[in-house]
Image (cartoon, grey):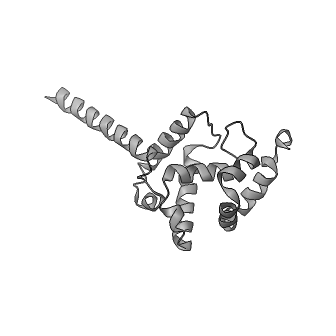
Amino acid sequence: MLFMRQTLSILCLLFSLLAMNTYAQTGNFNLEDWPQTPAALKPMYVKAIMEQAGVHQVSFTHPAKFYISELDKFAAFAQEKNYRPYLKTSVAQNLASIAVIHCDWNNGVPPWEFAQKYLGDKQLELLQPLYGDAITKLQNNCGHPSNSQ
């Protein structure tokens, strides 16, 4: 009986993690949902999103903990400014924007060039109050002379 309970508990956990992984990667999990997400689940969501990006040959240097903190900060900022488009956008896409701003979206394209294409001038302008220093670093190709154009 104990073995069956343990097996059932493990299966329930695995199904929960699978569902969470799928939910984190879809557009159904928006930034407005992030603040209510239990703290214990945030690392699992962020890691699932980062793993999915890895499938598309994107790598990160910052740990999941960094992105949890940044998503918390960004969600509060978007709520305060009533930036509905960000709040209605998936957590995965917002994490990608944060990674791009922080020179951490490593996909082989020069960081500033990719940021201009991915974010565009309007988004960069909207993000300036919160991420001014990071955007300046990004404009300077993340401080890497090898990235200069």
Within the image, what quadrant is residue 25 found in? top left
Left or right placement of residue 128 versus residue 72 in this view: right
Q: Residue furthest top?
A: 3
Left or right placement of residue 145 versus residue 100 in this view: right
Left or right placement of residue 103 versus residue 92 in this view: right
Residue in view at x 54 percent, y 56 percent: 71
Q: Picture coordinates of residue 40 (x, y %)?
A: 41, 49
- Asked if residue 43 is positioned above or below residue 125 in the image, the reply reads above
Residue in view at x 47 percent, y 40 percent: 48
- Quarter that holds the N terminus: top left
Left or right placement of residue 101 versus residue 140 in this view: left
Labels in figure, total: 0
Residue in view at x 55 percent, y 48 percent: 65
Within the image, what quadrant is residue 8 found in? top left
For the question of whether residue 41 can be seen, the reply is yes
For the question of whether residue 102 can be seen, the reply is no
Q: Picture coordinates of residue 27 (x, y %)?
A: 44, 51
Residue in view at x 54 percent, y 69 percent: 83
- Quarter that holds the C terminus: top right
Within the image, what quadrant is residue 2 found in? top left
